[in-house]
Image: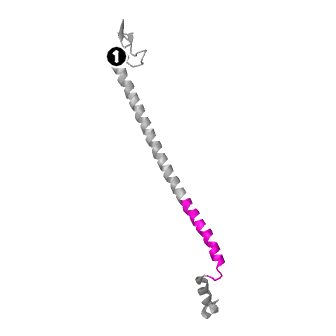
Amino acid sequence: MKKKCPFCLEEILIDAKKCKHCREFLDEEIRSQKERKLLVKKNYRNLVKIIIAIAVVLFLNKAYKVYKVYRIDSTINTIIKNLKPRFEEKSETPLFFEEHEKHNYSTPDSIKETL
């Protein structure tokens, strides 16, 4: 004897548990078990996607910080390279060196005696 599948309306055997045409389960118990398994699988996939997204965000954050430091370092190096010729062109010595030469940094006589 045959009956119609409630999903695709094709003729199937009365005691069939799964339609051979549309592959749907006809038994409610088997159908609910398969749906639960699919739901768990879907939740697992979503969890994996979330973990991957977090990992990507953390990686991009770290990469941006490294890029930012590199950019700052390269900017500082560029500034130093641009400033070096300016200091070399000036014939006058910086103020710090002039003040240093004015002071007499000789050791006091009391210290010389102990040495």
Provide residue 83's location: percent of width, then percent of height: 61, 72
Q: Main secondary structure of the magenta part?
A: helix
Q: Residue at x 35, y 24 (%)?
A: 32
Residue 14, can we see it? no
Residue 30: name its quadrant.
top left
* Relative side of 57 to 82, left or right: left
Residue 63 colored in magenta in the image: no
Q: Is residue 55 above or below residue 105?
A: above
Residue 82 colored in magenta in the image: yes
Provide residue 1's location: percent of width, then percent of height: 36, 5
Provide residue 80's location: percent of width, then percent of height: 60, 69
Return the residue nearer the eye: 84 or 104: 84
Q: Residue at x 62, y 87 (%)?
A: 101
Q: How is the image coloured?
A: one colour
Image quarter hosting the C terminus: bottom right
Q: Amino acid at mark 1?
A: Pro
Q: Is residue 49 above or below residue 74?
A: above
* Relative side of 107 to 37, left or right: right
Provide residue 26's location: percent of width, then percent of height: 36, 17
The magenta segment: 69-93
Mark 1 neighbour density, 10 Å: few (under 14) some (14–19) many (20 or more): few
Q: Is residue 114 above or below residue 12?
A: below
Residue 3: name its quadrant.
top left
**Residue that label 1 marks:** 6
Return the residue nearer the eye: 8 or 63: 8
